[in-house]
Image (cartoon, rainbow, N blue to C red):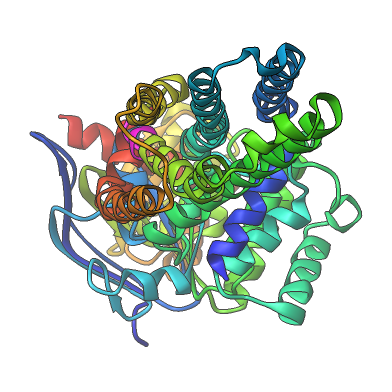
Amino acid sequence: MRALIRTEGLGKRYGNTAAVEGLTLEARPGEILGLLGPNGAGKTTTIRMLACLISPSAGRAWVAGYRVGEHDAEIRRRTGIVTESPGLYETLSAYRNLEFFATLYGVEGHQRREQIRRYLTMLDLWEDRHAPVATFSKGMRQKVSICRALIHEPAVLFLDEPTAGLDPEAARTVRDFIADLREEGRTILLCTHNLDEADRLCDRVAVLRQHLLALDTPARLRERLFGRRVTVTLASGDGEAAARAVRIAADLPFVQDVRQEPGGFSAALRDPDANTPDLVAALVRAGCRIRAVTEQTHTLEEVYLSLVQEEKQ
Amino acid sequence: MRVRAIIYKEWEEALRNKLLLYTSFTPPLVFVGIMVVMLRQMARAGSAVPPQAQAVVSAQFTLFLLMIPVILPTVMASYSIIGEKTSRSLEPLLATPVTVTEIMLGKGLAATIPAVLETWLAYFLTVLLVRLLAGPTAAALLVAPGFWLPVLLLSPPMAGLGVLLIMIVSSRVNDPRAAQQIGALVILPLLGLFLAQMFGRVKMTPPVVGAVFAGLLVANYLLLKVAVPLFQRETILTRWK
C-alpha cells in the first residue's frame, strides 16, 4: 500500500542549529504514527515541514502523493492540522470558526453545513455551536480545533499534542475520537509527550532527537530493547530453592539468560509464548513449587527513556 | 470566495471589539464637528471672510476628510496580522490552501472598505449639517468639485495605501503600535499636497485629482506586489514569540 507520508533524509536547520536531521520514515493509510521525543527534538518542526508551513533545508518529503515544496496547495487541501494551541477566533462561535475554515478549504453550501453539523455532533458540541469560543473550556476548544482539521475530510492528519492540558475525561474523548479516525482509514501523525497515549493509540512510534533514534511498533521496540522475560515466583521463596530453580532453568535449551531475583528468578526465553509452558513443566518435574509465572512488561516510557539516555551517552 | 470569507470574518471580529468600534467612529465625528462649527462661524461673519481664507478652510477640510481613511483602518489592519499571531490562529490559517495574496487582499479590503464608507458618510453628513446650520452659501464650498472630487475619489486608494503599508510592517513586527505608527506615515505626502494647495502651488482641479488618483492606484499595486513576498510564512511562524 502506498505510503501517505514519506520522508527521505528530511532536515531543517535554523542557522547553525539543526532542528531535524536525516529523517527517513513513512506512514501508511490507516496508520497512526507517533512522533516522540524530548522538547526541542524536532517533532513540531517535522509536522510543520510536512504541513507545508515551513520549508525543509534538506531531503525530500511526500504527503498524500504530492512532493512537499512543489505542490504545497495540493497537500494543504488533503491535510488537516491540530496545532499545540487551538488557535481559534475567540470572539466567534464554534460554528462560525468552522464555517470560515470550511470555506477556505473549498467546502461550500449544503456540504459545509452538513460537515459542521456532523463533527460538532460527534464531539458533543452541537448544543454550544453558537456560543463564542472564548466561553469554552480548554477541552471544548481542542475539540473545535479537531473539527476544524477534519472539516474538509483530509486523508492525512497532523496532531500536535492534541490532549495536552486536557482533563482525563476530555483527553479520553479525544483519544477515542482519534482511534475512530484511524478506522476511517486516515493516516495520522501524532506528536505527543504522553507515552501512555502513544502506546495505546499508535501503530508505530518514531523516537526523535533531531534525528531518528528508533521507528517500530511499541511492542517490537520493547522486545528489541528489553527482550521478553518471564518472572517465576516460587512458593518457598528461600535462596536455596531459587538457586536450584535457576540451575534447572539454565540447562534448558530455549532459555537464553537467567537471573536470580528475590522470591524466584527471571529468564529470557527464545519464544516466550511457546517456551513458558515447557519451562513450567521442567520446573514442576524437578520438584519446584511455583506460585506464579508472569511476563515482565515494560512501558513505552521505559523504552523511550532508554533510547534517549542511550543517545545522550 | 476565500477573500470574501476573510473579509466577513474580519468584520465579524471587529464588530465584537468595542475598542475598535470606538476608535472607528470617534475621529470622523470629531472632524465633522470641527468643520460644521468652523463653517457656521464663517457664515455668521458673512462677507468678512476673504476668498483666500475660504480656500485655506477648504484645503484644511479636504485634509481632515482624507485623514479619515488613513487613520481609521490602522488599528484593524495592524491587528489583522499581529492579532492572528498572538491568538495563535495564524498557523491553522496558513495550513489551509489560502494564498498570501488572498490573505493580504481579504484583510486589506476588510480594513479599507469601512474606512472609505465612513469617509464618504462623514462628507455627506458634513454637507447636510452645514446646509442646515450654516445655510446654502457655506454648504456651496463643500459641494464644489475641488472639494468633493478629492474626497470621494482619493479616499479609497489613500486607505489602501495606508492599510498595505501597515500590513507589510505588521507582518515583520510583533507590536501593533509600531505598525500603526509606520502606517500613519502615509499622511505625510497628503499633508504636503494640501499645504501646497493652501499656498496656491497646486489647485485641486479634476485633472490634478485624476493624476493623483492614478498615481495612488499605481502605488497600491506596487505595494501589494512588495507585500506578498515580504509576508514570509516561515519567518512569521518560527521567529515570532
Residue in the image at 84% along x and 25% along y: B133
Q: Identify the residue shown where x is 40% and y is 21%.
A: B181
- Judge whether A6 appears above or below B159 on screen: below
Residue A35 within the segment the image draws in magenta: no
Q: Is residue B147 visible?
A: yes
Residue at 46% across, 25% down: B176
Q: Nearer the viewer, residue A245 or B225?
A: B225
In this rendering, is residue A218 above or below B41? below
- Quadrant of the snapshot with the N terminus of chain A: bottom left
**Residue A3 horizontal/vertical position (percent):** 34, 79
Q: Which is more toward the observer, B26 or A87?
A: B26
Residue B106 rendering spot, x and y as whole percentages: 52, 55
Is residue A250 visible in this depiction of the protein? no
User: Residue at left 25%, top 32%?
Assistant: A309
Q: Residue furthest right?
A: A127
Q: How many marks?
A: 0
Quadrant housing the C terminus of chain A: top left
Residue A90: x and y in percent read 69, 38
Q: Is residue A170 left or right of residue A263?
A: right
Nearest the viewer among B82 and A34 is B82
What residue occupies the far front of the structure in this picture? B47
Is residue A207 toward the left or the right of residue A263 in the image? left
Residue B180 vs residue B122, the one in the foreground: B122
- Which secondary structure dominates the residues rendered in magenta? helix
Q: Is residue B133 above or below residue A93?
A: above
Question: Which residues are the magenta region?
Answer: B168-172
Q: Position of residue A159 (x, y in %)?
A: 50, 54
Q: Which residue extends farthest left? A: A16
- Quadrant of the rendered structure where residue B26 is? top right
